[in-house]
Amino acid sequence: MDIHIALQEYFKSIGLSQVAIAEELGVTKAYVNALLSGRQRFGKKQAETWSEKFGISKSWLLTGEGEMLNSAYSAGSVADSGIPARIPLIPASAFAGGVEGFASEAISLRNCESVVSPVAGAEYAIPITGDSMEPDYADGSIAYIRRINEAAFIPWGHTVVLDTENGAFIKRIYPDDSMEDYVWARSINPAYPPMHIPKKSIFRIFRVLGTSRIFTTM
């Protein structure tokens, strides 16, 4: 894949606009657009800056080879930018299509792999499996999530990751006006029926702040 197309798709997937990128870098939107469109090539200095700010591999920007994201991202470099450096990757799937996976009591954060989060405020990352939330949330994506206080506020109508007694899954959540002890979890893909879930089976709720995919040129 052309690196400029991959960059455009990557920043779109995590909800970072060209204006936001320009503000983060302290440059003009036109400058960012020139790099993302391919009208201007990345030089060594630009590649170093983008690697520090967004966790994108310097060598990938210069050569187009290898993985897009930098596995050796510096935590200190993003602390100043307000973008979290590394967060735990939950070794389970937020299943988009049914219920499986999370087993909350069995996961030790100390044993989790850590990944770079391009999304400010994210506490955890978790893989997405299945197609029930497509086209917005693709199978194979990584979701960047933050726990919410469900006792005080539930973001009705928003996409969340639910950690339940049956596993974790990603859905849009709605109240059940006729049964206050239940919620409705709905898919984006119309092929999947809504799920009726008792509140008592929900351990935790996480807001989805953004998603990304790992792009390679192989």
Image (cartoon, helix red, strand yellow):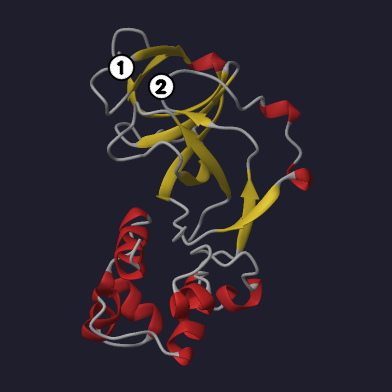
- Residue placed under numbered mark 2 in the picture: 97
Asked whether residue 18 is in view, the answer is: yes
- Residue placed under numbered mark 1 in the picture: 192
**Residue type beneath disc 1:** Tyr
Calculate the distance from the C-alpha at mark 2 to the C-alpha at mark 1. Answer: 7 Å
Q: Position of residue 8 (x, y in %)?
A: 30, 64
Crowd tier of the residue under label 1, counting other residues whose Cα lies within 10 Å: few below 14, some 14–19, many 20 or above: some
What number is the disc on residue 145? Answer: none
**Residue pictured at 46% horizontal, 40% vertical:** 140
Q: Position of residue 198 (x, y in %)?
A: 47, 12
**Residue pictured at 50% horizontal, 45% vertical:** 145
Which residue is at the far top?
178
Element class at badge 2: loop
Asked whether residue 81 is in view, the answer is: no
The answer to whether residue 55 is above or below residue 199 is below
Crowd tier of the residue under label 2, counting other residues whose Cα lies within 10 Å: few below 14, some 14–19, many 20 or above: many
Where does the N terminus fall, quadrant-wise? bottom left
Cβ atoms under marks 2 and 1 closer than 8 Å: yes
